[in-house]
Image (cartoon, grey):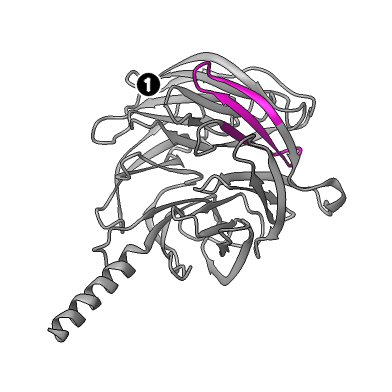
Amino acid sequence: MRFINAILSTILLVCAAQAEQTAVWIGMSEPTHGEREGIYRATLDTKTGALTQPKLAAEIGMSEFLALSPNGKRLYAACRLPNGDGGVAAYEISDDKRSLRLLNKVPTGGGQSCHVGVDRTGHCLFSAQYGGGNVAALPLDPDGKIVPSPTVIRHTGSGPNHERQEGPHPHFVGTDPDNHFLFVPDLGSDQIIIYKLDPQKCGLTAHGAGHTPPGSGPRHLVVHPNGRFVYVVNELAITVTAFRFDPAAGTLTEIQTIESLPAKDKKLPSTAAEIYIHPSGKFLYASTRNDDTITAFAVDPETGRLTFVEREPIRGSHPRSFNLDPSGKWLLAAGRDSNTISVFRIDQKTGRLVFNDQIVNTPSPISIVMQPEPAHSN
């Protein structure tokens, strides 16, 4: 009986260890040292923070941003098509989360995509075209393929920064938790454009806008887990603007704008890049390029206001992107110009980042998506 119990205990321990593996999908910009372009894959051990060496999972040009379907069975990527046009690609993820199978790739109809997102029903793929100044909505087939009939909406407007805000520059696409609205931060016009969403028809109707301070340049956005607050990282001002979101009216009301990198600490010309919130909703993180840091904030659960916690070096260069694993234990910081990903443990009480003494090399990483592997994977 003791022998059987020992075997059962061993099996349970193995299953538990296997359940703590998370697949890490990595998108990249154009490589600078001749590496193969595409989507790379690694595995994160969420018990120890160990990250395996990334390997090429799918070859495609300029996979600048990645997004998972709601059911986790598909991966969508911004890409460059063989003729040089901007496009989006759909992949089927294997059951063991180990490999990708190309479903199709189509042009966006609006230029090179800098960001992609999927609505919460999995019926529609959205793409933001920074250079083209427009947003594309593309229907998805039941099998996950992209229907090559995009609806392209051109933005208008400009801002006081004549060099960077001479016209509209959509930089992000993402829905509210109820899937009623699409948020599109536009760096060129200092607005978060809000569209009313019809997911069945993949339709967008202009609804309104939230506003960031003039010249701030809103870039990426995240919604608090409680659905009541929305946070936008402002690229040009290196700040974060907090909004109160009214899901019934579909409106954003500014609560606060707080510095990510105070002017007194600015040693180099820098720009803000990425923003994510902890699964608990207690902490918020924003990255700054050239300063090469990630700023941590504490979130007031009642008011949504932010309080500065710390600014942590990423041990790499140009953190255009980073992400938190679904368990909320680890943060992976991508150094585009250093060709690195650094691993940090998240202090669950304070939100501080603790370097895990691990850096892996991967070519020009600028997008990280994570999903838990099934417990039976090897």
Check the picture and name the quadrant holding the C terminus.
Answer: bottom left
Percent x, y of residue 264: 87, 50
Question: Which residue is most to the bottom?
Answer: 3
Check the picture and name the quadrant holding the N terminus.
Answer: bottom left
Question: Which residue is most to the left?
Answer: 1
Q: Is residue 140 above or below residue 27?
A: above
Report which residue position mark 1 lands on: 202
In magenta segment, residue 128? no
Q: Nearer the viewer, residue 324 or 336?
A: 324
Percent x, y of residue 75: 36, 44
Snapshot quadrant of residue 146: top left
Residue at 42% from the left image edge and 31% from the top image edge: 107
**Residue 169 appearing in the image:** yes
Instruction: Tell me if 104 is positioned left or right of 186 in this view.
Output: left
Snapshot quadrant of residue 150: top left
Snapshot quadrant of residue 299: top right
Region rendered in magenta: 229-255
Callout 1 amino acid: Cys
Instruction: Tell me if 303 is positioned left or right of 111 in this view.
Output: right
Instruction: Tell me if 131 is positioned left or right of 58 in this view.
Output: right
Q: Nearer the viewer, residue 211 or 341?
A: 211
In magenta segment, residue 244? yes
- How many labels sit on residues? 1
Percent x, y of residue 124: 37, 28
